[in-house]
Each structure stands twice: as C-alpha cells, then as structure tokens.
Image: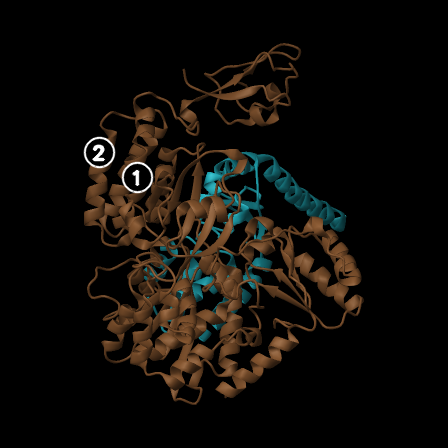
Chain colours: A cyan, B brown
Amino acid sequence: MDGNTCTCQSEKFKQLEKIIETHKNRPGALIPVMHEAQDLFGHLPFHVQAAIAEGLNVPLADVYGVATFYSKFTLQAKGTYQINVCLGTACYVKGAQAVLDKIADTLHIKVGETTSDGVFSLDATRCIGACGLAPVMTINDKVFGELDADKVEKILHEYLELVWGDDKNADTEEA
Amino acid sequence: MLTLKKLDEIREQTLAAANLENERKGTRIVVGMATCGLAAGAKPVYDLFQEEIIKRGLARVTLAQTGCIGTCRLEPIVEVYQPGQEKVTYVKVTPEKAKRIIASHLGNDEVIQEYTAALDFEAQERIALRNCGIINPELLDEYIAMDGYKALAKALLQMSPKQVIDEIKKSGLRGRGGGGFPTGLKWEFASKSEGEKYVCCNADEGDPGAFMDRSVLEGDPHAVIEAMAIAGYAIGSNMGYIYIRAEYPVAVKRLEIAINQARQAGVLGKDIFGTGFDFDLELRLGAGAFVCGEETALMISIEGKRGEPRPRPPFPAVKGLWGKPTILNNVETYANIPRIILLGADWFAGMGTNRSKGTKVFALGGKINNTGLIEIPMGTPLKDVIYKLGGGIPKGKKFKAAQTGGPSGGCIPAKHIETPIEYDTLIELGSMMGSGGLIVMDEDTCMVDVARFFLEFTVEESCGKCPPCRIGTKRMLDILERICNNQGREDDIEMLEKLAKTIKAASLCGLGQTAPNPVLSTLRYFRDEYDAHIIDHRCPAGVCTAFLQYVIDEAKCRKCGLCARSCPARAIIGRPKQTHRIDTELCVKCGLCMTKCPAKAIEKKQNQ
C-alpha cells in the first residue's frame, strides 16, 4: 500500500466513526451500520469489522456472523462494475442461465469472481422484481432487460470500450 | 397540526392544481417511473417532457412521475389526461417519440395513434394498487387528494381500537404474504397483550417472480404508512418498523421521502390529529436473506442479528420484536387497510369468494404475453388470468402449468385451468397463494428442471439452523441434479418422496416445511416427465442438455464455416465449402453454433 491509500483509508475510518456515532444508541444498530460501512469501503474487510465491533461494543464474532450470513455483505473487494444477473424464476424460465454463462465466458471469470484487473465482478442475484423485462441484469445501478447472449455481448463491449477509453485518456495525461 | 378540515382543504386544492379531478381544467401527463419503467428508459423521457413544457411555455400542464401502471412489457408508459377527453396511453416511449408526442398531441391536439395502446383494466379491481400509476408517490398532497389519511383520521376520531379490529375481522381480510392468516385475528391477539408493542411491515419480498409489494411501495408509499399507524392505534403500539429488501433502492428512497413528509405533516409523530395518539416509523434494510421473510427471522434480523428463525410458540403476538408483542403484516395487506376502514367491511367482503375476500395482486411472468401486475377479485378462474388478462402464451405455444407461491408453492397443471384462484383451492391442488407470483410455463419448460431450480434456491437460502432443511434439501437437490444429468436411478423418486416427507415434518420454520412442495407438486402432475428422464433417458421438453445432441442438417448447410469458427470446443468438423458435422464427443452443448448459423441448419435433437 502506498501513502496515498493510507490517507484515504484513514479518512474513511473517520467517516465510519461518524456513522457509528449516529446509530450507536438506536436498538439493533449493527446491520444499518454495516450497510453504510459497505457503501463506504465497497466491502467489509477484517479491520473494518473490527472497528465496527469496537465502536458498537459488540463481539467481533457477532459482526463476522452477520457479515457472512447475509448475501448482501461481502468480505472481498468487488470490481468497478458489479454485474448482477437475475436468476429469479421469471428470468430463469426466459433463459437467464444462458446470459450468465455468456458473461462468464466473455470475461473469463466464474460467478462470484472478479476479473484480475478489478474491473468486473459477476454475481447471480435473487429476483430484482423487474420480471416484466426478463431476463434482466444490472451493472452497478443500471438495469438491462430483455437480454440474450448477443445483446449481453454488445453491452459488455460497450463497457470494455469505456474502460479502455479511460486507459487511453490516462496514458495521454501522463504523457 | 393536520385536522380533518385541513385534509379536505388540501384534497380540494390538490385535485384542481394537479389536474387530478374528473372535471379537470388542465392537462395531466404521467410517466411511469417505478423500477421497471426506469429500467426501460423512463428517466430521459421524463426529462424531455419537463424540458419541452418549459421551452414551449405550456400553461396548465402538470407533469408527474408515478409508480407502476402494471403493464411492464410496454414500459416506458406515458399517459396524457386532457379536459373532457379519454386518457391517452402512449407505450414504449423513447425521447424521440416523446418529442413528436409533445409537438403533435399537446401542440396540435392530434393523438399519435401508432404509439398508443388501449390498456384494458376492466377485468381488474384495484384496491391495493388504487393509486399506483395515478398519483405522484413523492407528493403527500396527491395522496391526500385521493382520500389519503382520511381513514387514519376516521379511525382515531370516530372509532375505538376495538371497533377498528372488529371492522378488519368482519372484512375477512387474510394475510397477503403467504399463509393467509386472518389479519383481524392477528391484531386481536396482539391487542390483548400488555405493555410495549410493535407494528412491523414485511417488505422483504423474497419470492422470485413476485413484485407487487415493490410496486405498492414505489407507487403509493403513504398507503402503507397510514395503515401501519391505524394498526398501531388498534393494538396499542407507538412504534413501527418497515423491513425492506436492500434490492429495492427506488422503493427505499420513496419510503424515506414519504416518512419524512408524514412526520412533517403530523400524521406520524406525537399527538396525531390532536387525539394524543403517538406513532412513529423506522426503516430497516434487509441484506439479502430469503429466510428473513419468515416472521421470527425477520424480527431477529431487525434486532441486528443473523436472521435465523426460532420455534413458535410463543407467537410474535405474545413475544416478538425485542421480546415484546408484535404484529407483522405484509405490504399488500396493509395497502388494503385504509380502504376497508373508509368504505367499510361489508364493501370489502362483497368482493371475492366465501373464504377469500377482496382482491389479490398477481405478478404475471414467464411465458405469457402480458407480463406485469394485475389485481383481480379472489375467485377469478386461472383460465381468465392466463388468456383474458394475460393475453395467452407467446408464439402460440401450449400452456403447461402455472407456478404459484414461489419456492414454497407448486404448480397448477393445464387440466385444472378452470380452478378459481383463492387460498383454499390452491392448497387443495398442492400449491399455495404465496405472495402472488404467478409464473406461466409452456410446453418448452421441463418440470424436472423447474423443480431442480427451486430446490437450488432453497438450498442456497436455507439458513442452516435445523438439519432437516440444511441437509435434506441438499440431498433432494443432488438427486434432482442427477436426474437432469441423465444419471437418474429407478429408486430416486421413492427417495425424493421419503426425504420430502421428513423435511416437511421436521423443519423448524416455513422455509423448510414448504421447501419440498415444488418437487411434490411436479411429481403429482408430471410424473411422466420424471419417468422419461430416468427410464427413457430423454427430456421431453428438450431443456436438460445432457439428453440433447446438436446436429447439422446437411441439406440446409450452406457450407460457410461460421459454426466451425465460433465453436469454443472445436467440435465442428469440416472445411469451408464442405458440409459440416458436429463431433458429439467433443461438443459441450453450448448452443453457440446454433445462434451463429445463418441458414438455421443446426438443430437440437433428443438422444437416440
């Protein structure tokens, strides 16, 4: 870790303290704090869990227990673009599995993994309630509906171009 | 402080100002902006309308975002209400179309017919969805304009808590979240308990394929808040919690806005309507655990712990959240309450059947033309739902079964299509109402694969506390996977039935007790499909890939070589200008060649 990351991390820990402070005296504060902590850090690594346990005065084992029980909480860092393919019944019946396989194939990762460059993470998700548009996936907060293998490939390429475009810009800036 | 008189004033003013009244003087344009609308691209359409209205200086035009209109397949939907005219519904609107609509419809009074669709709501009876797609869910005044918070005022000012409970009991309202327990009875139990109490709302809509609760929360959040305050008054509670899934960001945002508005207006907080009754609400976000839809698990999750259910009794009405008496109802149940209080139990009980009163919202999905939400009187035959409201099966395929009740339910096969839909008939058929997801399956759906899909879901979502559910469902899934992989054994079905019986009898909570239902129900009606997999080694619907072979029809093959180049397993033999052939030993059955072939010469065939 270089010096820059450290300052930004300690900045985040200060924010975490504030989050803990606002929830501290409410009953059942643990899960709301963990939601906000995950929004802040992107995931819940060990030292974040430890800080929450100390701040709320609950055993670390409880924090870890909650973090591993609920699928929304993740201990691993996620990619810049989080791809969630809905595997709810309506989507499944309409071919969501093929869509998921296509993405895994294109990005060379399995479900639950992140690409080695940290750009994409792929997960299968529960019904997101957009059954009318099945099969559906989300990339971060954006929803894509009525997918098939071809459509999904196009969408992925758009995102890849976005990433490569950024890289190019970064290169020219450095130059 | 809000008073009854003030409510009426706001109502009158808003009806006129927002062009909501029947005799409207101006134009009202609504854009459907629930999750499905937003996903289909409603935001740019809304922005364009806003821009154009300002640019053109259109007076007396109200532009409003609304919740789900119910016809998801046609989103984004824009509805235009003009004085003295029938409303016009534009469907699949894009910014380009929106520009033309503004120029033609608002500019020259000419409706662009080719963009419209006539949405038929005649067969529907909308109570829980009464305001969805009509009012702007982010404006309290528009809710009040539709008689909002009038029921709360009536309950607090004119009724005793006992009268409220009696009214709900008399209405025959049953829980819309799954079990169908009489709501009034639940309230009565809790009202008899002493001390501090809580009112909870289950908005952890976990059944895959059900999204009516999301729709209500996104389209009419105040209805739920009002109902919870009424429930608080009835049972003697001052605090409520709404437990909502984090997967519904739009609903969370609209609820937060609505709760703040309600606090500011004084319909939440201290001394509501000057009666001395205090009630407040808090939102709690779920974190992706299906088991938290179970009542004891949900309350434990609100307490900030792992959402593992506990044995009942004691029931939550005696010992619930933080050990205090608690009632829990789901979103759709609450959405019915204000109407029942306002219009009376007799009005509500006048709809539906003997044992199931009122209406039910269904989320139609799967292989059906009109996917979306419908609200129909209880007792409507399944046939009407599929063919009248649902518009039938796409591509003229044959209806095979409808799945209700999600992973806890079962399927209703084609031979029972005349069945009226109500709580008890569904249970007799081996299914259940559940929260109202209705997934339609056609001849191309493999029922063994469907059973496997649901078991995979339960295995993943089993919390692991009790062994019958944790281990039993996994064993059932192993067997189903084997059957789908062409490795079924003759005694597999017997084993499945035995496991199902044990899991149902011995599991701790509803999740485990109902987990075998999809298997039992498909075994009951589609035993022949299981036998086909195990004995004949074929999948009649052509879904399970282990039974399939991809074959190139030599007569159709144009010898272009596209398939060979796209094949990831290099299983296609043949040079360009030669007829191609698939090596079945190497083929991984991904189906890519089939999508690439310009001559459609590649077919899926059952094993010989």
User: Does residue B197 sit above or below B81 in this rendering?
Assistant: below
**Chain ID, mark 1:** B
- For mark 2, what is the residue? B495
Q: Earlier in the sequence, mark 1 or mark 2?
A: 2
**Disc 1 vs disc 2: Cβ atoms closer than 8 Å?**
no
Q: Secondary structure at mark 1?
A: helix
Specify the amino acid type for callout 2: Met
Position of A158 compared to B490: left or right? right
Label annotation for residue B184: none
Q: Residue at x 73, y 53 (%)?
A: B112
Q: Residue at x 43, y 90 (%)?
A: B274
Q: Residue at x 24, y 72 (%)?
A: B189
> x%, y% of residue A51?
42, 65
**Chain ID, mark 2:** B
Q: Tell which of B504 and A73 is nearer to you.
A: B504
- For mark 1, what is the residue? B519
Position of B161 compared to B338: left or right? left
How many labels, in total?
2
Q: Nearer the viewer, mark 1 or mark 2?
A: 1
Specify the amino acid type for callout 1: Val
Q: Looking at the figure, which quarter contains the C terminus of chain B?
A: top left
Q: Residues within 10 Å of mark 2 (few under 14, many from 20)?
A: some
> x%, y% of residue B382?
40, 46
Rendered image quadrant of residue B19: bottom right
Residue B2 seen: no
Rendered image quadrant of residue B100: bottom right
User: Does residue B587 sit above or below B338 in this rendering?
Assistant: above
Q: Residue at x 24, y 60 (%)?
A: B310
Q: Residues within 10 Å of mark 1 (few under 14, many from 20)?
A: many
Q: Secondary structure at mark 2?
A: helix
